[in-house]
Amino acid sequence: MSDFAIHTEGMTKRFGQVAAVDHLNLTIPKGTIYGFLGPNGCGKSTSIRMLTGLLSPTEGKVTVLGKQLPKQAESLRLRVGYMTQKFSLYDNLTVEENLHFVRRIYGLGKDGKARVASLLDAYELAERRHQMAGSMSGGQKQRLALAAATIHHPELLFLDEPTSAVDPENRRDFWERLFDLCNEGTTILVSTHYMDEAERCHGLAILERGQMRADGSPESLMASMGANVFEVEGPDLRDLKRRLTIHTEILSASQLGVRLRVLVSKQVANPIAWLTANIGNAYRIDEVRPSLEDVFVTCTGRHAHEFG
């Protein structure tokens, strides 16, 4: 059996003349959390819909859990879970009624009743079992949706921007639950536009305009980034930014409080000396660890060709 939960070759989806997903090649190992990172409209949701069998690709090969899509999509129905970006359960049903409705869809009988009870406890929903889902907070709805998506113990779980409507504390707790699921053997593909969430993934693809700009672990992507990163402190940072960004050697300059975060192309042999020569001695320059946001800047937009 393959060690990969998902494998695609040239997966493409066109809507008319527009390629929403453009020849995407994916290899996602089982038992990992893999992320799609990118802005709205980059192809994340369309890719997930093809990988769940809800959309047929225009061209390319798609294999999910050893099954060829779309022709074998029905055989995957009980093996995958899908949590959509928008809350998709019923507002006019209670928490418990929603879970029982979903477990009937999956054909879970007596064991399903016990499963609902265990999920109510596991996701801290037992005290809200009789509450209407529509009256819950964003974080509570998120926990309910995840419970519903995993009610049938899926081997592969798809999450489409699942934390877009919740606060940072709930986002953190949600990710702890994902690692619990992964530890139990579930493979997870999650789309996000949050850099901190992307850093939690074992591997990720950075997408832009339907194309993959980079692929690998967060650590490897940061290590192979085509820029050195510096933070500069000193007077009049707005003027300094304008003076720096006219140089093609500067890939990005953005202000963080009293510091300017500057990405200098690795084509510059001695970047500290180059910066000092161009900005003067009135500034403190420190080299810092790259972040995924830095990676994103260097491999998308006008700097995409300079990555790696």
Image: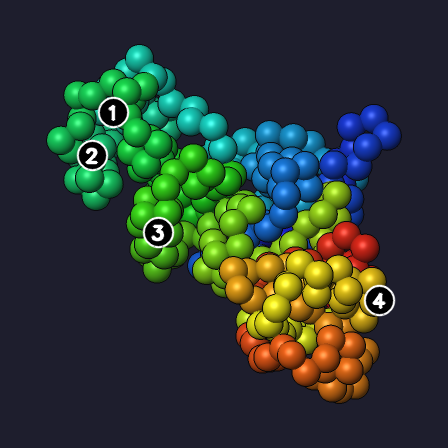
Q: On the picture, is 165 further left or further right than 205?
A: left
Q: CA distance from mark 3 to mark 1?
A: 22 Å
* Mark 2: amino acid: Leu
- Residue in the image at 67% along x and 45% along y: 62
Q: Residues within 10 Å of mark 4 (few under 14, many from 20)?
A: few
| Mark 4 touches mark 2? (CB < 8 Å) | no
Which of the marked residues, 3 or 2, is nearer the chain's N terminus?
2
Give the labeled residue for mark 4.
248
| Mark 3 vs mark 2: in front | 3
SS at mark 4 in the image: loop
Query: Looking at the figure, which quarter contains the N terminus?
Result: bottom right
Give the labeled residue for mark 3.
172
SS at mark 2 in the image: loop
Give the labeled residue for mark 1.
95
Labelled disc at residue 125: 2
Which of the marked residues, 3 or 1, is nearer the chain's N terminus?
1
- Image coordinates for residue 271, horizontal then vertical, percent: 73, 82
Which of the marked residues, 1 or 4, is nearer the chain's N terminus?
1
| Mark 1 touches mark 2? (CB < 8 Å) | yes
Against 182, is 231 above or below? below
* Mark 4: amino acid: Thr
Q: CA distance from mark 1 to mark 4?
A: 56 Å
Q: Quadrant of residue 290?
A: bottom right
| Mark 3 touches mark 4? (CB < 8 Å) | no
- Spot the residue most to the left: 127
Observer-nearest of 222 and 260: 260
